[in-house]
Image (tube, rainbow, N blue to C red):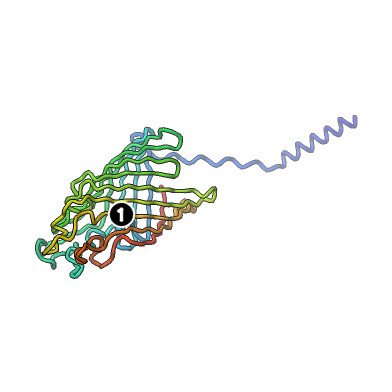
Amino acid sequence: MQFWTTLSLSAALATGLVAQSPTPPAAPPAPPPPPSILGFAVTGSTTIGSQYIFRGLTQTDGKPTVQVELDLVHPTGFYASVAMSNISWFTDQNAGFASARTGLGSPAAVGAPYLPGKVNSASVELDLFGGYKWGFAKDWTLDVGLYRYLYPGTYDNLGAYRNPATTEGYLGLSYSWASLKYSQVISANTFGVNNSGGTTYVDLSLAIPLGESGWTVLAHGGKTTYSTKANPGYFFNGSTMTGNNSLFSYTDYKVGIVKEIKGYTLTLAGTNADTKSRASDNDVTVYENALGRNIGKDRLTFTIAKAF
């Protein structure tokens, strides 16, 4: 009898303790799925940064940038995106010589073939791109698509330059945190350089997570290759040919660190591009802008991005 009394008391005590125990918290609700259009999930991001770097070149002459991107992704692997950023690089170009710099945005002072009273303006880059991603094995992805770079603006006084709008085809292969991508220009000109169709870019990029710390290390190497096609309208200095389009070829590198904090992605990266400032006569400029600065070389950039 004492045994059953003790057992009953123990059961009652256990029941009381269970009743007094706090109710475990409910699992957080799953985040709502992104909105969709015709089966395409709609996502995007906004970015602010200390400058806009593209393939090792500053697109804003070292000044701040604001960017936005909208992405449509289909479960089958097809995708399409649009992105926009402020830029200044095109009208910052030197329309004359290093010895008499004149910005392409106001080139009237350099004389023929520029027209008096005519100017150029290009302050925005608009990118349209899309393609297909195929996950053909665990952690392996093949990516193929087209990229169209557009620069809305006024182009009334280009002289030796061309409208910078450019079309590229690309093929990429990625495994886990490593990716290799090959791009080739299929338009007649490349970012305003005359007679430069077929320019290629090879990009090897790594995004290495540091365990469970939330930090990611970035490493990148890229190679831009222009053909040796002549461009006499640009490289003729009035007496001799100072080079050809191969002077625009260069290699770029990047090392950086990424951390996500409360939904914001913070990136600090150092870049280097071995871009040539001038041609052999030391007067015709290559990557030296009208402000006397090489838009490549060593740069440090900080960005904050927010996905939506």
Query: Residue flagged by tag 1: what amino acid is it?
Result: Ser
Q: Residue at x 39, y 34 (%)?
A: 75
Residue 23 in percent (x, y) is at 65, 41
Residue 221 in percent (x, y) is at 37, 51
On the picture, is 135 further left or further right than 233?
Answer: right
* Up-down relation of residue 242 to residue 183 (above or below): below
Compare residues 253 and 83 and report the one nearer the observer: 253
Disc 1 on helix, strand or loop?
strand
Location of residue 178 (image quadrant): top left
Q: Residue at x 50, y 52 (%)?
A: 215
Compare residues 303 and 167 and report the one nearer the observer: 167
Location of residue 96 (image quadrant): bottom left
Residue 211 in percent (x, y) is at 54, 48
Disc 1: which residue: 85
On the picture, is 198 further left or further right than 260?
Answer: left
Compare residues 130 and 136 and report the one nearer the observer: 136
Q: Pick out the residue farthest to the bottom.
A: 99
* Up-down relation of residue 294 to residue 194 (above or below): below
* Up-down relation of residue 9 to residue 272 (above or below): above
